[in-house]
Amino acid sequence: MGVTMKPQDGSARLETWAQVDEGFHVGSRAGEFLGYVDRSSPTDYRAFDMTSRPTGSFVDLSKAIQAVNDQGRTGADT
Amino acid sequence: MTDNGFIHNAPSEALYSLVYTSESRVPFDDRTLTELLERSRDANHAKGITGILLFRRERFVQFLEGPEGAVRALMHRIADDPRHAKIRILIDGNPAHRQFTAWTRGYQPIQEPSTPPPPGFRDTFDDLESIDDADAVLRAARELTIWFRAKATNPHQHSA
């Protein structure tokens, strides 16, 4: 599973993801908190944004992480 | 010093915070850790000290914040406590705001994961012990804070 993602515009905004506890993962980019993913069941990964508000539920970790990364990029670009 | 359960500093003393790790010299389980926290909770609340205590792999990770003199005095007592060994202060400073206004030394059990982090993921506890990477230590401390807040908000959320 790839968790370090390079944006298509060629900039160097790489995300760093860490496992804190079983099923709990936190993302950062350039030292800033991006959001987190908390697993509530084997097929329910809940994504939260940088203000810790829920942004959606996903069936696997990679999709939840992608959602947090995308949301963070949108927030950084606006 | 308290207002509706929230703790504020006396205006004359700066807010001070630190994060330390230590090794346990004696066995602790959830029951003995809870007893330890209950004994110190009232005293710390009266002194305006808040924070969290984590225990994993026979190591403590503790965040303390409050009036600088009170936090430094508590840290000296911890350093003299024979139950702690290899104490290392990871971060200290004077933040503008508390991170744990509503809790007084909250305790969250944290289990050893049954599986390693997925490929490409960092391990927060490994980063916390980084000797030469201050950025990783800061990031790991923030990750633990986020985890604690999430679990305090949704205590019944499970990860099984």
Image (spheres, grey):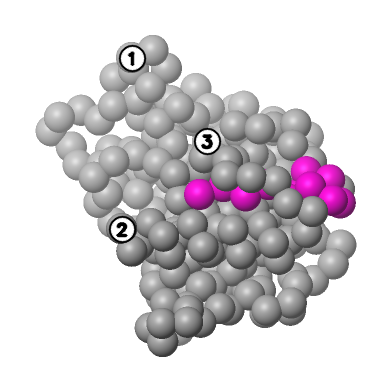
Distance, label 2 to label 3, CA atoms, is: 38 Å
Residue assigned mark 3: B105
Q: Residues within 10 Å of mark 2 (few under 14, many from 20)?
A: few
With B74 as the anchor, is B3 left or right in this view? left
With B144 as the anchor, is A11 left or right in this view? left
Measuring 62% from the left and 27% from the top, which residue is drawn there? B38
Q: Count the marks: how many?
A: 3
Q: Is residue B126 above or below residue B44?
A: below
> Helix, strand or loop at disc 3?
loop
Q: Is residue B148 visible?
A: no
Distance, label 1 to label 3, CA atoms, is: 17 Å
Nearer to us of marks 2 and 1 is: 2
Query: In what quadrant of the picture does the N terminus of chain B appear?
Result: top left
Q: Chain of mark 1?
A: B
* Residue type, label 3: Arg
Residue A48, magenta (yes or no)? yes
- Report x, y in % for residue B6: 38, 22
Residue that extends furthest to the front in the rendered view of this protein: A9
Distance, label 2 to label 1, CA atoms, is: 38 Å
* Residue type, label 1: Asp
Residue assigned mark 2: A78
Decide whether the magenta segment is chiefly helix, strand or loop. strand
**Residue B58 found in image quarter:** bottom right
> Helix, strand or loop at disc 1?
strand
For the residues bearing labels 1 and 3, Cβ distance under 8 angstroms? no
Task: Give the residues in magenta.
Answer: A39-49
- Report x, y in % for residue A2: 68, 79
